[in-house]
């Protein structure tokens, strides 16, 4: 195990937390990311210092601009708050009094934000709420699985402040208007486009396709601290930044986070992407081999649906295996150590294994847990469990 892994398990033990193995992806509920060492060092270094925060964010703007091709940018608390700040900026511009009056006193301001219906998803909270927090009125267009150019064009009025485009595996992946055309329709009518690209590795493509602002998570692929990035057109970035005097105050980002994200961005530039890809591939091959020739289990390596440079192992789980997909995910999560898989599509009869967040040695741990779990299905009521919406556990917290 790495030093990072070791100290990590020590603090977990001290706090009485289970040592989970994460093959579900960069999940907020599991702590978001393995923060890269460069970011950890930068955070520790700046923590005891006084700094002038506007200057620190100016330096962050330079780094973000270099990596994204944007005119400017800044570090936010997370991607959801970047979207709130971007929407607020589109509503107020640089009018300081309007900034103080958000989110409810919006007389005389354009407040509508257009979103394709198939993009109205939840990433743990509803995407439209991040806009409503800014005082926006969300205008969904089209249907969940069908949006045409005219749905967007005709929804634009003199009240339209912006349009949001979501890039994610969560969204409907067909029948909607693509980003380039979405931007064309909006640009022709003077409406800025904000892109939610929270977990997309592509730092340049969305602005290059015509977006005005793009929002990322700093704690997903980048391996930064829990944070977000907002990048784009300078006037819009400025208007979003000024929201720190308004609704942004409750989304405050600290010096340690800004320094950590800057270091994570710089580390991203020099990261051995090929080497990481090869390690991820080796984990997938190992799991594929482990799961081959087992009754009722069909493992397939599949590319990421939004074209990030990563593959996952989709594991189709048929009843002959002794498990349902939901039951298999639950059994792995209840094991020792708990293996948390990507199970949000389990009702379709498969789970996925994501190789992007492993500490050294954990691919082998996952393989042995997969094999051991399949050879001992246990109580069929649990192993064959059907997916069920269940908020009871949530409602018992902190018990
Ligand atoms: C994760 C995610 C978010 C939220 O990002 P945070 O940085 O956790 O706020 C927003 N949109 C999409 C598509 C996501 O995947």
Image: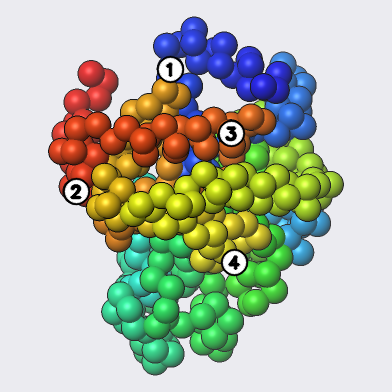
Report the residue at 68% width, 54% height from top.
73
Image coords of residue 88 (percent x, y): 47, 57
Give the class, few, some or many, for how many residues have Cα within 10 Å of label 3's Cα (few <14, many ≥20).
few
Image coords of residue 141 (percent x, y): 33, 78
Select label 4 or label 2 by which is in front: 2
Of residues 298 and 284, the one drawn nearer to the viewer in this rendering = 298
> CA gap, disc 4 to disc 2?
31 Å
The quadrant in which the N terminus is found is top right
Give the class, few, some or many, for how many residues have Cα within 10 Å of label 2's Cα (few <14, many ≥20).
some
> CA gap, disc 4 to disc 3?
27 Å
Of residues 310 and 362, the one drawn nearer to the viewer in this rendering = 362
Q: Which residue is disc 2 drawn over?
A: 386
Left or right for 196, reference 105: right
Return the disc, 4 or 2, that comes first in the chain's sequence.
Answer: 4
Q: Which residue is disc 3 drawn over?
A: 364
Label 3 C-beta lies within 8 Å of the nearest ligand 1 atom: no
Of residues 314 and 212, the one drawn nearer to the viewer in this rendering = 314
Q: Which residue is disc 4 drawn over?
A: 307
**Is residue 344 in view?**
no
Q: Secondary structure at mark 2?
A: loop
Select label 1 or label 3 by which is in front: 3
């Amino acid at each position: 195990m790495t030093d990072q892994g070791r100290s990590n398990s020590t603090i977990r033990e001290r706090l009485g937390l289970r040592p989970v193995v994460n093959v579900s992806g960069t999940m907020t509920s599991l702590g978001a990311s393995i923060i890269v060492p460069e970011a950890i060092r930068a955070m520790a270094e700046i923590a005891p210092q006084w700094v002038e925060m506007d200057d620190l964010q100016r330096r962050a703007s330079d780094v973000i601009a270099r990596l994204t091709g944007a005119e400017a940018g800044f570090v936010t608390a997370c991607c959801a708050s970047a979207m709130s700040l971007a929407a607020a900026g589109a509503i107020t511009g640089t009018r300081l009094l309007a900034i103080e009056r958000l989110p409810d006193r919006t007389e005389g301001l354009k407040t509508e934000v257009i979103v394709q219906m198939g993009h109205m998803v939840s990433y743990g909270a509803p995407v439209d709420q991040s806009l409503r927090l800014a005082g926006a009125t969300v205008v969904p267009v089209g249907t969940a699985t069908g949006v045409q150019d005219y749905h967007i064009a005709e929804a634009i009025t003199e009240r339209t402040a912006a349009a949001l485009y979501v890039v994610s595996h969560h969204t409907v992946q067909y029948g909607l208007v693509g980003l380039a055309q979405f931007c064309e329709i909006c640009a022709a009518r003077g409406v800025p486009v904000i892109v939610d690209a929270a977990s997309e590795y592509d730092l340049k493509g969305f602005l290059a396709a015509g977006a005005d602002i793009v929002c990322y998570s700093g704690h997903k692929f980048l391996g930064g601290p829990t944070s977000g990035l907002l990048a784009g057109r300078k006037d819009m970035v400025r208007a979003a930044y000024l929201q720190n005097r308004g609704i942004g105050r409750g989304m405050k980002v600290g010096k340690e986070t800004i320094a950590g994200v800057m270091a994570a961005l710089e580390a991203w530039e020099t990261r051995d992407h090929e080497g990481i890809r090869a390690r991820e591939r080796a984990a997938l091959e190992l799991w594929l081999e482990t799961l081959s020739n087992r009754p009722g289990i069909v493992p397939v390596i599949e590319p990421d649906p939004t074209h990030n440079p990563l593959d996952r192992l989709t594991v189709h789980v048929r009843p002959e295996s002794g498990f349902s997909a939901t039951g298999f995910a639950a059994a792995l999560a209840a094991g020792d150590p708990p293996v948390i898989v990507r199970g949000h599509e389990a009702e379709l009869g498969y789970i996925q294994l994501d190789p992007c967040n492993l500490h050294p040695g954990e691919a082998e741990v996952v393989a042995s847990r997969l094999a051991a779990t399949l050879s001992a299905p246990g109580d069929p009521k649990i192993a064959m469990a059907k997916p069920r919406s269940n908020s009871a556990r949530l409602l018992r917290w902190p018990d």
